[in-house]
C-alpha cells in the first residue's frame, strides 16, 4: 500500500516510465529477504537514488541523443553499481563507509531532499513545463514563484493531496497520545494514508477525465502502464555506454552504500540488534545485479518504508516476500487502473516522503553542540546541494570529511603534564591518596581551574600523546617537544661569550640590548635531564615516528649539551615496543655513534658522523659547573633530591603519612621486562624510577 505508490512516483524522478519503479520494487524486497541482516529495512526505489539516476540518464542522453533509451541507461547503471557494491562486500571492506561521518551523510541527504521537493513543486502546480526543474535548487525555487500565477487545474489535485497526507499524518500521530487505546488502529490508518490518497484522487480523476482525448484532458495523468513483466532480459552494457556512465559511477555507488548502511544501522540501534555491513553490501549488490534481468534501475534502503516495517512489528527479513508478491499482483492485475493517477498527486507523495529526510533544527543544533567542525560539513553539504548540485554536495561531504580526519591525525592535541594529588573525601574509609597527571595549562574547563597543578621536578618533561605517532603528525609533535624543552629549560652550554661567527648559521642569538635580561631569566631555569612520554593513547608507531623521536632526542641533547634520558610508559603493543627498541630507546644503554637514521633515504657513512659533544671523553659537569652564575634556583640541587622531595609523603594532621600507595613486603616479580628499564607501566612508575635508579643524577 506504500511501496506501489512510491515506486510509481520515484520512477518519474529517474526519467523512466512508471512500470520500471514497480520492476525495481518487487525484485528488491524479494532478493533482500534472502541476504539481509536487518529485519526492518525495505529495499526498492528511493528518492535520492532516483534523482541521481535521472541526472545520469539526462547527462548520457545529452551526449548520445536517442542512441540509448532511458531504461537502457538506468539498467546498465544498476548493473555496474551493483557489481561494485557486491565486490566491496565480498572482499570484506565494507568498513570504508565508516570514513563518512553521520553529519556528512545527513547533510547531503538534507540537501538532496530539499532539491527533490523543490523540483516537484512545479509539477504540483502544473507548471513543470515552464521551467527547468533540473537546474540548481535556488533557481528552481525562484522560477517557481515567478510562474506560480500560471498554475493549472493540477494544483487542485496536488495541493489538496499534500494537505490530506499531512492531515492524516498529524491527526493519527496526535490521537494515540490523547487516546492510547486507539494507538494500534491509529498506526494502521496513518500507514494507509498513501494508498488512500492515491485511490480517492484517482477515482476523482477518472470520473472527471474519462472519455477525454489527450488534448482535452485538463490535468496530467500517468498514462498507460503495461501489465506484467514486459522487459525481461540482460542489461545492455557496451564500452561506449560504460565510458559515458563511468564519471557518474562514484556518486551513484556512494549513495547506494551510505543511504542503505545508515538506515540499517539506525534501525538496528532502535530495535536492539547489530547488522553486518559486508553482508548488507552483498545484499544490495545481488539485488541490483539480478534486478537488471527484470529491467530494474538502482535501488537501496528506504527510510520511510523501513520505519513502517519497524513499527509494524516485523520479526524477520522474510516480511519482504509477501510484499514482493503483492507488488507482482498489482503489476499484473491493477496496471490499467494506474492510467488515471494524476501526476500532481505523485508529486505530492514525493514531497511528503522526502520531507522526512530533512534534518530537524534539533538535530542540526546537536551537530553543533557535539562537533562544530562537523556542523560546518553538514551545512556545507546542504548549501552545495542547494546552490549547485547533489553531486557537488556528495563530493563536498567526502572531501571535507577526509580532510577533517587527516587534520585531526596530523595535528593531535597532546599535553604536557603536571601532577595533582587527590585526597579521598572519606578519610575514615582507609583509602589512600593517589597522584594523577593532568595538563599543565588547561583552559578547556574539563578540570577545576581552582586546583593547582604541580609542575614536574626541575629538568623533567612529561608529555602525553592523544593520537598514534605516525608520519602525518611526527614532525609536528617533534617540534612541540623541542620548543617546550627550549622554553622551560636552559641551554647546557654557555653561549654568552660565543661570537656570532662561531654560532650556527640559523642561531643568531639574542640582540645585544636583550642579552642580559635573557641570561638572567634563563639562569633560573633547570637543565633538561629526562623526557617522559606517555604512550597510553598511541595505537601505532611507524618508521617516520621513530625517526622523529631520534631527531627529538638529538635536538634536546644538543640543547642540554649532555645525555637526556627518554622514558616511555603505557606501552601495551609489542610492535610499538619493538619499534622503539629498534630506534635505540628503552634499553638504557645506547651506542650514540650508531645510525643517525632508522631508514635513511640516501646511503650514510656513519663513521664520518660527528660525535655528540656530550659523548666525548670529558668529565661530566656538575650542576654548579654547568651554571655560570653559580646559583640557578632549584638546579643547584641534584635531581635525586628534587625527586625525593617531589615523591615524599605528606603528613596528615595526626602525623601519619599520606602515601599514594603501599609496598607489598611479600616477594614480587616485575611486570615489564628488565632488559628495557626505560619502559614503564605508568607515569608514577616512571617518575619513581627516575628518583631511585640514579640514571639521571649528575
Image (cartoon, helix red, strand yellow):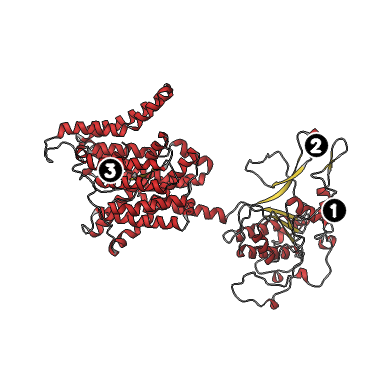
Counting from the top left corner in percent of width and height, residue 168 is at 33, 28
Q: Which residue occupies the extreme right position in the image?
A: 655
In primary-sequence order, the first of circles 3 and 2 is: 3
* Observer-nearest of 346 and 614: 346
Q: Is residue 472 left or right of residue 454?
A: left
Mark 3–mark 2 CB contact (< 8 Å): no
Counting from the top left corner in percent of width and height, residue 440 is at 69, 47
Quarter of the image holding residue 185? top left
Quarter of the image holding residue 654? top right
- Say the numbered circle drawn on residue 328: 3
Label 3 secondary element: helix
Q: CA distance from mark 3 to mark 1?
A: 87 Å
In primary-sequence order, the first of circles 3 and 1 is: 3
For discs 3 and 2, the disc positioned in front in the rendered view: 3
Q: Residue at x 78, y 72 (%)?
A: 616
* Observer-nearest of 670 and 290: 290
* Observer-nearest of 502 and 299: 299
- Residue, disc 1: 641
For discs 3 and 1, the disc positioned in front in the rendered view: 3
Q: Is residue 627 left or right of residue 568?
A: right
Amino acid at each position: 500500500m506504500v511501496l506501489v505508490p512510491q515506486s510509481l512516483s520515484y520512477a518519474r524522478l529517474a526519467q523512466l516510465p512508471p512500470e520500471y519503479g514497480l520492476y525495481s520494487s518487487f525484485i528488491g524486497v524479494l532478493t533482500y529477504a534472502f541476504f539481509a541482516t536487518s529485519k526492518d529495512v525495505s529495499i526498492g526505489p528511493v528518492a535520492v537514488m532516483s534523482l541521481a539516476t535521472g541526472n545520469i540518464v539526462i547527462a548520457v542522453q545529452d551526449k548520445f541523443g536517442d542512441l540509448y533509451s532511458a531504461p537502457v541507461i538506468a539498467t546498465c547503471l544498476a548493473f555496474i553499481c551493483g557489481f561494485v557494491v557486491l565486490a566491496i562486500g565480498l572482499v570484506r571492506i565494507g568498513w570504508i563507509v565508516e570514513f563518512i561521518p553521520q553529519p556528512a551523510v545527513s547533510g547531503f541527504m538534507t540537501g538532496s531532499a530539499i532539491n527533490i521537493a523543490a523540483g516537484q513543486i512545479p509539477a504540483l502546480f502544473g507548471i513543470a513545463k515552464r521551467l527547468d526543474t533540473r537546474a540548481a535548487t535556488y533557481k528552481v525555487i525562484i522560477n517557481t514563484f515567478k510562474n506560480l500565477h500560471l498554475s493549472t487545474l493540477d494544483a487542485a489535485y496536488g495541493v489538496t493531496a499534500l494537505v490530506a497526507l499531512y492531515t492524516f499524518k498529524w491527526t493519527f500521530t496526535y490521537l494515540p497520545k490523547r487516546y492510547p487505546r486507539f494507538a494500534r488502529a491509529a498506526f494502521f490508518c496513518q500507514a494507509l494514508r498513501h494508498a488512500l490518497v492515491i485511490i480517492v484522487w484517482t477515482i476523482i480523476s477518472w470520473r472527471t477525465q474519462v472519455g477525454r482525448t489527450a488534448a482535452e484532458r485538463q490535468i496530467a495523468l500517468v498514462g498507460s502502464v503495461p501489465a506484467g513483466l514486459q522487459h525481461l532480459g540482460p542489461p545492455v552494457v557496451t564500452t561506449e555506454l560504460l565510458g559515458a556512465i563511468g564519471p557518474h559511477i562514484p556518486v551513484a555507488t556512494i549513495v547506494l552504500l551510505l543511504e542503505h548502511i545508515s538506515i540499517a544501522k539506525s534501525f538496528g540501534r532502535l530495535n536492539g540488534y547489530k547488522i553486518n555491513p559486508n553482508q548488507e553490501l552483498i545484499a544490495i549488490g545481488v539485488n541490483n545485479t539480478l534486478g537488471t534481468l527484470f529491467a530494474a534501475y538502482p535501488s537501496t534502503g528506504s527510510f520511510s518504508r523501513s520505519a513502517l516495517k519497524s513499527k509494524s512489528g516485523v520479526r524477520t527479513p522474510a516480511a519482504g516476500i509477501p510484499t514482493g508478491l503483492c507488488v507482482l499482483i498489482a503489476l499484473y492485475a491493477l496496471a490499467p487502473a494506474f492510467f488515471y493517477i494524476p501526476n500532481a498527486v505523485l508529486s505530492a507523495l514525493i514531497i511528503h516522503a522526502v520531507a522526512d529526510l530533512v534534518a530537524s533544527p534539533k538535530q542540526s543544533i546537536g551537530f553543533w553542540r557535539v562537533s562544530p567542525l562537523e556542523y560546518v560539513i553538514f551545512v556545507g553539504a546542504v548549501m552545495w546541494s542547494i546552490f549547485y548540485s547533489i553531486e557537488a554536495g556528495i563530493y563536498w561531504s567526502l572531501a571535507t570529511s577526509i580532510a577533517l580526519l587527516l587534520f585531526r591525525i596530523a595535528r593531535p592535541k597532546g599535553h604536557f603534564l603536571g601532577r595533582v594529588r587527590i585526597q579521598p573525601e572519606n578519610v575514615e574509609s582507609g583509602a589512600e591518596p593517589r597522584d594523577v597527571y593532568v595538563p599543565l595549562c588547561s583552559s578547556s574547563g574539563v578540570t577545576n581551574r581552582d586546583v593547582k597543578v604541580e609542575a614536574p621536578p626541575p629538568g623533567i618533561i612529561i608529555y602525553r600523546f592523544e593520537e598514534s605517532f605516525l608520519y602525518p603528525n611526527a614532525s609536528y609533535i617533534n617540534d612541540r617537544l623541542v620548543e617546550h624543552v627550549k622554553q622551560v629549560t636552559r641551554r647546557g652550554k654557555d653561549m654568552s661569550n660565543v661570537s656570532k661567527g662561531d654560532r650556527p648559521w640559523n642561531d643568531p642569538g639574542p640582540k645585544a640590548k636583550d642579552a642580559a635580561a635573557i641570561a638572567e631569566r634563563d639562569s633560573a631555569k633547570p637543565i633538561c635531564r629526562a623526557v617522559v612520554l606517555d604512550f597510553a593513547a598511541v595505537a601505532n608507531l611507524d618508521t617516520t615516528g621513530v625517526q622523529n623521536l631520534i631527531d627529538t632526542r638529538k635536538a634536546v641533547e644538543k640543547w642540554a649539551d649532555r645525555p637526556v634520558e627518554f622514558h616511555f610508559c603505557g606501552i601495551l603493543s609489542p610492535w610499538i615496543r619493538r619499534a622503539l627498541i629498534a630506534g635505540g630507546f628503552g634499553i638504557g644503554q645506547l651506542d650514540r655513534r650508531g645510525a643517525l637514521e632508522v631508514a635513511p633515504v640516501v646511503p650514510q657513512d656513519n663513521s664520518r658522523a660527528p660525535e655528540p659533544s656530550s659523548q666525548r671523553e670529558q668529565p661530566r659537569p656538575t650542576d654548579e659547573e654547568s651554571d655560570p652564575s653559580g646559583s640557578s634556583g632549584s638546579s643547584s640541587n641534584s635531581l635525586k633530591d628534587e625527586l625525593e622531595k617531589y615523591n615524599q609523603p605528606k603528613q596528615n594532621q595526626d602525623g601519619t603519612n599520606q602515601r599514594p600507595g603501599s609496598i607489598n613486603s611479600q616477594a614480587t616479580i616485575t611486570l615489564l621486562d628488565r632488559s628495557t628499564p626505560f619502559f614503564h607501566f605508568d607515569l608514577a612508575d616512571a617518575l619513581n624510577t627516575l628518583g631511585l635508579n640514579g640514571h639521571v643524577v649528575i
